[in-house]
Amino acid sequence: MSAVPGADLRHKVACEQERIDEILHEVGRLYYLGAERYGEQLKRLCSDIDERKRRIKNMKNQYDAMKSVRRCPKCQTELNLDYKFCGVCGTDVAHTAVNAGKELEVRDDE
Ligand SMILES: [Zn+2]
């Protein structure tokens, strides 16, 4: 578990988006070389992009679910909304508990 909740997911989404850019680059190259000759390859690359976009969507849903959970700012334990103290480390969380914070940046290039 990483120190910042959601950091893993943010990193994974960034990796997928980077890969999509690479694939799009390759699609452009093959298209330039001859869409008919490379049709099968182009189809594969395009469905690869679709698959990655599906994965990003799932990760975004996971992230949103994670964001709605309150966590102890000290040990990151998930807390019920009505807890006043963290059950693990005893931190006063009445006013300090945090959620995963900032929005997951998902590019919308549909
Ligand atoms: Zn704690």
Image (cartoon, rainbow, N blue to C red):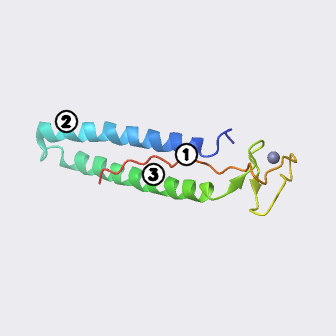
Residue at screen point 55% across, 45% down: 9
Task: Count neighbours of disc 3 (C-alpha within 10 A) and say few if under 14, some if 14 to 19, many if 20 or more.
Answer: many
Discs 2/3, front? 3
Residue at screen point 59% across, 48% down: 101
> Left or right of 50: which side holds 85?
right
The image position of residue 12, as x and y in percent, is 51, 42
The image position of residue 77, as x and y in percent, is 76, 50
Mark 1, residue position: 9
Mark 3, residue position: 56
- CA–CA distance between discs 2 and 3? 25 Å
Task: Count neighbours of disc 1 (C-alpha within 10 A) and say few if under 14, some if 14 to 19, many if 20 or more.
Answer: some
Choose top left, top right, bottom left or bottom right for residue 16: top left
> Please, what is the three-letter code of the amino acid marked with disc 1?
Leu
Q: If you read the primary sequence from the N terminus, does the residue marked by circle 3 or circle 1 appear first?
A: 1
User: Is residue 72 positioned above or below 69 on the image?
Assistant: above
* Quarter of the rendering occupied by the C terminus: bottom left
> Left or right of 54: which side holds 33?
left
- CA–CA distance between discs 2 and 1? 30 Å
Helix, strand or loop status at disc 2:
helix
The image's mark for residue 29 is: 2
The image position of residue 41, as x and y in percent, is 25, 45
Determine contact: label 2, label 3, CB under 8 Å: no
> Left or right of 60: which side holds 100?
right
> Left or right of 96: which side holds 36?
left
Relative depth, front residue between 110 and 97: 97
Determine contact: label 2, label 1, CB under 8 Å: no
Q: If you read the primary sequence from the N terminus, does the residue marked by circle 2 or circle 1 appear first?
A: 1
> Please, what is the three-letter code of the amino acid marked with disc 2?
Arg
Residue at screen point 50% across, 54% down: 60
